[in-house]
Amino acid sequence: MPSGMLAALILSHAANSPYVQSGDCSVLNPLRRRLEAMTHIANKQQLLRSILSGWLSLAAEIAVALLLTPYIIAKLGAATYGVWSLMISVIGYLGLIDVGIRGSVGRYINHYLARNDQRALNEVVGTSTVVLSALSLLAGAAAYALGNNFSTIFPKTPAELQGDIRLALPLLAIGLWLSFISSILSNLLAAKEALYLTNAYNLVVLLLRSGAIYWALGHNHGIDALVVITLCSSALGALLSLWSVRRAYAGEKLEFLCFSLERLKKIWRFGLAAFVGRSASTMANDSAPIIGMWILGPEAVAIYSVAMMLTQNARRALEQASNAVFPSVMKAGAIHDLPGLRGLFIRFMDIGFAIGSLIFLGLAFFSGDFLKLWVGPLYQEGSSTVAILALGYLLGSIASTGPLSLASLDHVNTTMRISLAEAILCIVLTAALPGLFGLGLAGMALGSTLPRLITGCAVYPWLSIHYLGAELAPTMRAGLQRNLYFAGLIACCFWLIAALRPSAESWSAFFITVILATLAYLMIVASRYRDLPLIGTLTNRIRPWLPWISKP
């Protein structure tokens, strides 16, 4: 299904009640009309543009990784590629030196932009630029020290690579600084609903970098060429973003070299809480393979890791929508626009279920054939793990913008405590269910999923009603009923297709199954919606052929 058609469907499903053919939407109409009238909240076209560009960039990134990685390994050799990957990981860990500042910059840029506080906006931009640049110097010093002692820390490093490593790590640290600056610039663009520009620049830089790597390795260059290409591509991305920011903020005279200790305290306090919460979530996800290695062994970890990779890549499609709605939530929270936050909660719940009903339910019912064809029959037993993880992510859409809304209203400490509790429970259950209860891989998946279901389906909805107002309760209830019914219909159709069709023994047979599932998805959409933008031409033609539709 073309991504433009799907995105149009999602946004119409979320924000255009005139398209709904059944169900009680009387409580939703006022919120949706209000959303369309709010200048600080992205409209349908802006969300469509941001989501589409994000999906395109994500698809290109995945495709390049699949195609280019084997080529890089073949040209560099396993040992050199391993060292290159390790250096990238080291720089990634050095990026933690910001201790959450990057995570809070976007919040405060949108916060002060919504309040029309130019002085505070400049202080956020300038302070974050100065502090992140200073921290980059520390990271550079650490990279220099690591480069000079790399073979001591990692004794199995090939001796012939030591010179390249000594030069590469400090240069990659410069790239880390550029990524810090780029994160500020991308947040500035997103605050002006120009996230699509960031996505477009990422795509351009990705393609240029990939082409340069292909050429350089084809001419027998090594790690030194990869470092130069990585650094130059990062600089190009930062320059393109800076140029766009200058144009977008032409009348606002942004200052990149000012400093405010008071503003730094605010940014760091919020960022530290967000950093702890994000680290706890990462720990919860990454603990399963470690615990699995201890309890079940390496084969089980391999199967689980493949299943986790599939579901997390699918989740990234939903994260693109989250990135698109982030500025609107932060701006609404900045001016304490509770009706706007309530409307965004319902909109994003709809978006999550519309995306998830196709992607996550598709994984739940058809991942077995995909795993068998992709990595072999041994990994097919991971399909139950994929199903558990995928259904957990789908039902997590009930939380909608709850965590973001709480953060926008300065309750980030609450979300941090929830993330910590979730991480602890994940670790306990992931150890207990496979080991004490003998549930194996399914136990690992349940251990990772059940805590998220508790927070996503109970804790965050309750907190959202508490902080956003009791008016959210009826709209949440109506939205939940509508979305669960919609997802249930999709699940029934996918189950029938999986049960009736023969097991896919080739990629062509698998793609036929995917096409059938997509057609079923379209028919269900056509039975409940009409006159949708872009996709309406197709679904309106399908409607007369559906006998259960009441004809006008």
Image (cartoon, helix red, strand yellow):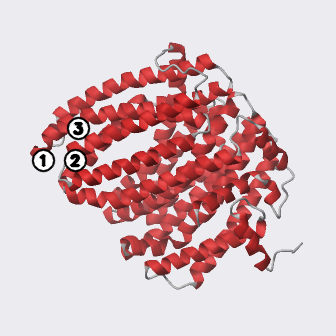
- Quarter holding the N terminus is bottom right
Q: Residues within 10 Å of mark 2 (few under 14, many from 20)?
A: some
Mark positioned earlier in the residue sequence (2 or 3): 2
According to the picture, the residue beneath numbered tag 1 turns out to be: 158
The kind of residue on which mark 3 rests is: Ala
Mark positioned earlier in the residue sequence (3 or 1): 1
The percent coordinates of residue 427 (x first, y second) are 46, 49
The kind of residue on which mark 2 rests is: Val
**In the image, what residue occupies the spot 27% across and 29% down?**
142
According to the picture, the residue beneath numbered tag 2 turns out to be: 83
Q: CA distance from mark 1 to mark 2?
A: 9 Å
Q: Quadrant of residue 148?
A: top left
| Disc sitting over residue 260 in the figure | none
- Quarter holding the C terminus is bottom right
Instruction: Say if mark 2 contacts mark 3, CB within 8 Å.
Output: no
- Under circle 1, the secondary element is loop
Does residue 394 lie above or below 34 as drawn?
Answer: below
According to the picture, the residue beneath numbered tag 3 turns out to be: 168
**In the image, what residue occupies the spot 75% across and 38% down?**
340
The percent coordinates of residue 305 (x first, y second) are 40, 59
Foreground: disc 3 or disc 1: 3
Q: Indicate left or right for 470 with 312 as reference.
A: right
